Image (cartoon, rainbow, N blue to C red):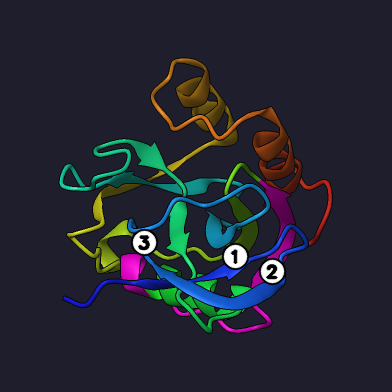
Amino acid sequence: MQAEKWDIMDSEGVPTGRTTLRGNYLFKKGEYHLVVHIWILSSDGRVLIQRRSENKKLMPGEWAATGGAAQAGEDSFTAAARELFEELSIKADRQSLKFVKRIKRRNSFVDVWMIKTDISEKDLILQKSEVAQVKWVSAQELEEMIEKGNYHNYGSEYFSVVFDIINGRGITL
C-alpha cells in the first residue's frame, strides 16, 4: 500500500504547494494539514458513532468521529465524502453533506461535516482496517460516553459545535 500524501497548509488553511508523506514529517510552527470529521445524524436525533479498529496506530479501539486526513490535492468536501464512503459505505453529495465549521488545532485544521441519514447499521459495509463497530446512540448517551472517557475527547470547543448541531442549533440538515 502506498503511503498517503498530505498537503502542507499555512496558518490560514491555504496549501503551501508542499506535501508530506503521512507520519514522515514533523510540522513546524505555522504548518498544518487538513483533517475531516463527519457526524451522522438520524431524523430522530440519534448519532451514528464508530469504534476504531484495534490495529490503528492512533487511538486504537476508541469510539471516535468518522473521518481522517485529506489526501494531497483533495478539498474538504471531497475528503469528507471519500472518508464517509470508505469507512461506512455511505454515499454523500453536496446537498446531503453539510459543512459545519473549521477548527484550528495544534498541527491540523479539522473540518466538521454533518449528514442526515436513517441507514440501518446492518446496511453499512465497514472498512475493517479502520472501523471495528458502529452503533446509533442518543445525544445523552454520547455525552455520557465522553464524560466517562468512553469516547475520544476532542475538547470542549469541538463538542460545543457538535452538540449545537445535534440539538438543532446552527445549520439545518
Q: Secondary structure at mark 1?
A: strand
Tell me the CA gap for discs 1 and 3: 14 Å
Q: Quadrant of residue 42?
A: bottom right
Q: Nearer the viewer, mark 1 or mark 3?
A: 1
94 to 159, vertically: above or below = below
Q: Quadrant of residue 145?
A: top left
Q: Position of residue 16 (x, y in %)?
A: 65, 74
Q: Earlier in the sequence, mark 2 or mark 3?
A: 2
> Which of the numbered marks, if any, corresponds to residue 115?
1
> Amino acid under label 2?
Lys
Residue at image mark 3: 120
Residue labelled with disc 2: 98
Marks 1/2: CA distance? 6 Å
Circle 2 — which element? strand
Instruction: Confirm whether the magenta stretch covers residue 146.
Output: no
Location of residue 136 with respect to 128 vertically, above or below = above
Residue 50, percent from left and from top: 36, 47
Q: Is any part of residue 122 visible from this angle? A: yes
On-image quarter of the C terminus: bottom right
In front: 75, or 4? 4
Name which residue lies at 36% across and 38% down.
63
